[in-house]
Amino acid sequence: MCDHWGMADDFPLISADPAIHHGQACIRGTRLSVSVVLDCLAEGMTGDQILAEYPTLTSDGVQAALEYAAALAREEHRAFSRCCVKFKLDEDTPLRLAALLRERGNDADTVQDEGLTGSPDSRIAKAAADERRILISLDLGFSDIRAHPPGSHPGIAQV
């Protein structure tokens, strides 16, 4: 889970994991997104009706969803889903791209930041995969699915 703004401390029952529900803010320990709870409330369902419909949800989870939504409405916090994209930029990408990604609330590391300049492709790919980062590179070799099969890494963006 990404926690650039202290959200885990403020909302212990809300989590966002890129591997669960595509990184949407969910009630911790479930695949139930905060937006589903809020949609139910907006449709006029009572807390008890929502709990009956979603047995993995607790009343504390409903309350946490409301508190999370209120904080977002007050703009006290950025949404969880905005901070959870982690990138590793290859040496052949401009540093301004890393700065732009960071400005947008992403977690962007560069090969230069980690002292991996001049390293073999396999070392760059392993570093990105070990850190669960999407690799951004101009190197066409990273698009070879025989060398980098889907599921062996979080993602590779060849630009």
Image: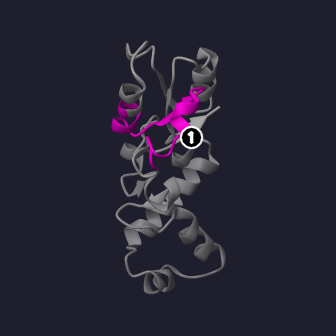
Q: Between residue 121 and residue 14, name the one nearer to us.
A: 121
Location of residue 119 in the rendering, given as x and y in whole percent from the top left corner: 39, 17
Q: Is residue 24 visible?
A: no
Quarter of the figure that contains the C terminus:
top right
Location of residue 26 in the rendering, given as x and y in whole percent from the top left corner: 46, 61
Rendered view: 95 above or below 153: above
Rendered view: 145 above or below 109: below
User: Which residue lies at the image location 45% right of the left edge and 48% below the top edge?
Assistant: 149
Label 1 crowd bin: few (<14), some (14–19), many (20+), radius 10 Å: few
Q: Is residue 144 within the magenta segment?
A: yes
Q: Is residue 8 within the magenta segment?
A: no
Rendered view: 113 above or below 150: above
Q: Between residue 49 and residue 133, name the one nearer to us.
A: 133
Q: Amino acid at mark 1?
A: Glu
Q: Between residue 75 and residue 95, name the one nearer to us.
A: 95
Q: How many marks?
A: 1
Quarter location, residue 116: top left
User: Which residue lies at the image location 42% right of the left edge and 52% below the top edge?
Assistant: 151
Left or right: where 113 falls relative to 73 = left
Which colouring convention does the figure follow?
A: one colour
Q: Is residue 157 visible?
A: yes
Location of residue 72 in the rendering, given as x and y in whole percent from the top left corner: 59, 48
Residue reaching furthest to the front: 146
Left or right: where 44 falls relative to 154 = right
User: Which residue lies at the image location 37% right of the left edge and 13% below the top edge?
Assistant: 115
Q: Which residues are magenta?
A: 126-149
Quarter location, residue 96: top right
Location of residue 38 in the rendering, given as x and y in whole percent from the top left corner: 58, 68
- Residue at numbered disc 1: 76
Element type at marker 1? Answer: loop
